[in-house]
Amino acid sequence: MTDPISDFLTRIRNAGRALLPVIEMPHSRTKEGIARIMVREGYIADCAVEGAKLKKLKLKLKFNGRKGVIEGLRRVSRPGLRHYVAVDKIPRVLGGLGVAILSTPRGLMTGTEARKQNLGGEVLCYVW
């Protein structure tokens, strides 16, 4: 697999459209960090790591009736074309209604957190 983050986002998107309450996927620290940000921002209900040797990331999705809370996910920076931004160029997703997730020198964080800490970095994805 050349882009595990894109696979992670695609699994969430497909599970939301299929109305699956829980999904499992292979674990990585980056995926776990993105999932924890999504839990903190209210897009996912819960995130857990299971297994000792072969770790799995288990996500519990949120729904409003028969519609998922996550309306859209978009991968921005990819292995073939990285997208780095300075602190003054951090994008606002849907005028502040969505979240941009960045990889900064101090770890993964949202665009608003990065602006507050005066950090730029690689824009991984948008969630709205």
Image (cartoon, helix red, strand yellow):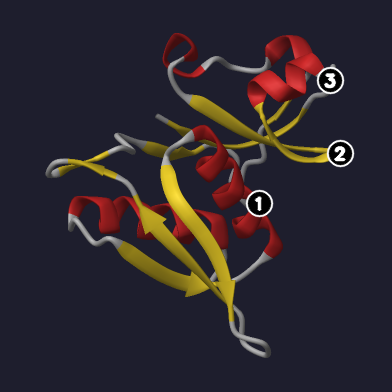
The residue under the point 44% across, 61% down is 59
User: Would you say the residues marked 2 and 3 are in contact, meaning their CB atoms lie under 8 Å apart?
Assistant: yes
Q: Where is residue 12 in the image (x, y as percent from the top left)?
A: 37, 54
From the viewer's perspective, is residue 1 above or below residue 122? below
Left or right: where 24 falls relative to 51: left
User: What label does residue 117 carry, if any?
Assistant: 3
The residue under the point 49% across, 13% down is 96
Q: Position of residue 80 (x, y in %)?
A: 61, 49
The residue under the point 37% across, 60% down is 11
Instruction: Give the class, few, some or many, for how many residues have Cα within 10 Å of label 2's Cα (few <14, many ≥20).
Output: few
User: What label does residue 106 carry, if any?
Assistant: 2
From the viewer's perspective, is residue 118 above or below residue 25? above
Nearer-the-camera pick, 64 or 11: 64
| Residue 48 visible, this angle | yes
Specify the amino acid type for callout 1: Gly
User: What label does residue 33 carry, if any?
Assistant: 1
- Secondary structure state at the residue bearing disc 3: loop
Quarter of the image with the C terminus in it: top left
Instruction: Give the class, few, some or many, for how many residues have Cα within 10 Å of label 1's Cα (few <14, many ≥20).
Output: some
Q: Quadrant of residue 94?
A: top left
Q: In terms of sequence position, does the residue under pointer 2 or pointer 1 come before the other?
A: 1
